[in-house]
């Protein structure tokens, strides 16, 4: 069996994008039909669907996720889930990290890779937070109003660059790093403007 696990902040946020990416990935690799399991980030830890999904896994099954951060909310939780999936004999596929974790893969290697990915994500979040705090501090010192006008986004200034990158097939994660924003922020912006000329043509 091939399971696609989707976790989002709200019922609709980014759900279609994750599902499309997982379907394309499974099709390209000939994994077979995908059964999707989804839940929202607000689900309590004890009642999370991912734990019920892990219990359903069997030897040679595949669990496909968009990125590792969707599978767990902390490194310790991620490692616990990884070990349980390995015990079941299933394989994890993390699309955005181009990562395949086989059930018989070396524990030290898997732990080191997961740690490096989680640390990288934490550093990226911290850098974004620091840039935001510094920008707010400068605006306060200059006596400028905080926030942005209603209906405006700071990504509007990067519109032409975003359209160009998308037309060249650059994925959302890479573009967000290039322009210095959170990937989810860019995804939300694209969803908001996806029917506009240029953005619509480059949307995938």
Image (spheres, rainbow, N blue to C red):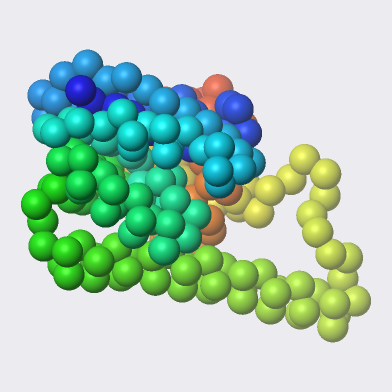
Residue drawn at the location 9% of the way across and 52% of the way down: 104
User: Position of 50 compared to 110: left or right?
Assistant: right
Q: Which of the pair 44/9 is nearer the observer? A: 44
Toward the top, the furthest residue is: 33
Count how many numbered circles sit on residues in the image: 0
Give the x, y percent position of residue 147.
81, 59
User: Position of 163 compared to 112: left or right?
Assistant: right
User: Position of 90 compared to 52: left or right?
Assistant: left
Residue drawn at the location 56% of the way across and 46% of the way down: 45
Give the x, y percent position of residue 30.
10, 24
Residue drawn at the location 55% of the way across and 22% of the way down: 195
The reply to whether residue 18 is in sight is no
Task: Name the image quarter holding the N terminus.
Answer: top left
Q: Which of the pair 41/183 is nearer the observer? A: 41
Q: Is residue 103 above or below residue 202?
A: below
Residue drawn at the location 22% of the way across and 16% of the way down: 33
The reply to whether residue 145 is in sight is yes
Give the x, y percent position of residue 111.
25, 66
Q: Quadrant of residue 43?
A: top right
Task: Name the image quarter holding the C terminus.
Answer: top left
Q: Which of the pair 55/137 is nearer the observer? A: 55
Q: Quadrant of residue 138?
A: bottom right
Q: Is residue 7 above or below residue 173?
A: above
Give the x, y percent position of residue 194.
53, 28
Q: Is residue 72 above or below residue 36?
A: below
Q: Which of the pair 1/116 is nearer the observer? A: 1
């Amino acid at each position: 069996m091939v399971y696609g696990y989707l976790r989002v902040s709200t019922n609709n946020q980014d759900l279609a994008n994750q599902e499309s990416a997982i379907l394309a990935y499974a099709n390209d690799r000939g994994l077979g039909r995908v059964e999707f399991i989804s839940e929202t980030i607000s689900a309590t830890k004890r009642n999370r669907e991912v734990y019920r999904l892990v219990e359903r896994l069997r030897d040679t099954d595949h669990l496909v996720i968009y990125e590792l951060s969707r599978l767990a909310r902390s490194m310790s939780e991620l490692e616990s889930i990884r070990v349980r999936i390995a015990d079941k004999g299933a394989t994890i596929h993390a699309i955005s990290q181009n990562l395949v974790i086989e059930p018989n893969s070396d524990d030290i290697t898997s732990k080191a890779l997961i740690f490096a990915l989680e640390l990288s994500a934490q550093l990226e979040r911290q850098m974004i937070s620091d840039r935001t705090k510094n920008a707010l501090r400068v605006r306060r010192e200059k006596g400028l109003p905080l926030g942005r006008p209603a209906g405006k986004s700071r990504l509007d200034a990067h519109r032409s660059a975003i359209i160009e990158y998308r037309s060249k097939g650059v994925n959302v994660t890479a573009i967000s790093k290039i322009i210095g924003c959170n990937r989810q922020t860019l995804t939300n912006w694209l969803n908001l403007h996806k029917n506009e000329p240029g953005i619509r043509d480059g949307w995938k």
